[in-house]
Image (cartoon, helix red, strand yellow):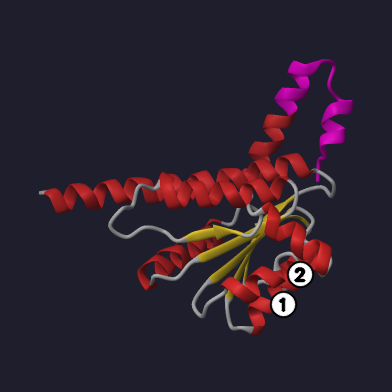
Amino acid sequence: MKSVDTIYNNSSDFKSFATGYLDHLNELLSTLDLDKLDQFCQQLESLRNRGDKMILCGNGGSASTAGHFVNDFSIGTRSIEKPFNLMSLTDNTAVITAIGNDYGYDQIFKKQLETYLNSGDIVVVISASGNSENLIKAVDYAKSKGSFTIGLLGFDGGKLKDMVDLDIMVTSAKGDYGPVEDAHLVINHLMMNYFLRQSHDKSRANAE
C-alpha cells in the first residue's frame, strides 16, 4: 500500500505532492465496501425509527469527526419530523478531564457509556489505528450490554476490527492518519447528504 511518505519522496514541489495525495485519497475511497456502508445506513434508519441514539467516540482528529457526525446528522439532515439522535463522548471537556483524572484516560468513554448507554443504542468508534485502549474498553462495555457496535477504521483495522459488529475499513499504510481521517469525513458527508435529500423528498411528498 502506497504511503504519504512515498508520495512526498516522489514529489518535486507542493503541486506534485498535492496531485499524488489526492490521487491516493481517491484510491482509498474506491476501496470502500459499499455493502457495509449500506448496512451502516440501514442501522441509522432503524435507529431513528426506534427513537434510539447513536453514540460516537474517537481520539485526536477522530474526536472532531465524532462531533462532526453529531452536527451533520442532528442538524444538517434537517429531518424535523423524525430527527436523528446522536451524541459524541468527546465534546464535554469537564467530563473527559474528570474521568481521566479520577479513573485514567483509558476509561473516558467507558465511564460515559455507563451513564448514557441505553438498550437499543448503537456505539460507533472512530480510529485510524484501531488500537486505542479507551475505544477497546468502550466496545467491550457496549457489547456486554448487547449494543450494536460499528468501527470506522484505518490501516489494518487493529484490534477493533475483530471486535465490532460492523467494520468500515479504510485500508491504508500504517501511520497515514491524514488520508484515513479524510475518508472518514467523506463517509460522514456521503451519508448525511443522502439522508438530507431523503428528508427533502419526504417533506415534498407530505406537502402534496
Residue in the foreground of this view, choosing between 43 and 171: 43
User: On the rendered structure, is 138 left or right of 156?
Assistant: left
Residue 152 appears in view: no
- Position of 197 with respect to 26 (left or right) is left
* Residue that label 2 marks: 136
Q: Measuring 43% from the left and 69% from the top, which residue is drawn there?
A: 47
Q: Is residue 61 visible?
A: yes
Along the line of sight, which residue is nearer the eye, 97 or 141? 97
Depicted 168 relative to depicted 164: above or below: above
Query: Could you say where residue 173 lies in the image, as x and y percent from the top left?
Result: 82, 47
Q: Looking at numbered disc 1 in the image, what kind of residue is underneath it? A: Asp
For residue 72, above or below residue 115: above
For mark 2, give the secondary structure: helix
- 8 in relation to 152, above or below: above
Q: Is residue 13 magenta?
A: yes
- Which residue has dot 1 on it? 140
- Badge 1 local density, few (<14 within 10 Å), some, or many (20+)? some
Q: Residue, x 69% and y 60% (percent of image)?
A: 95
| Amino acid found under the numbered disc labelled 2 | Ile
Residue range corresponding to the magenta coloring? 1-20
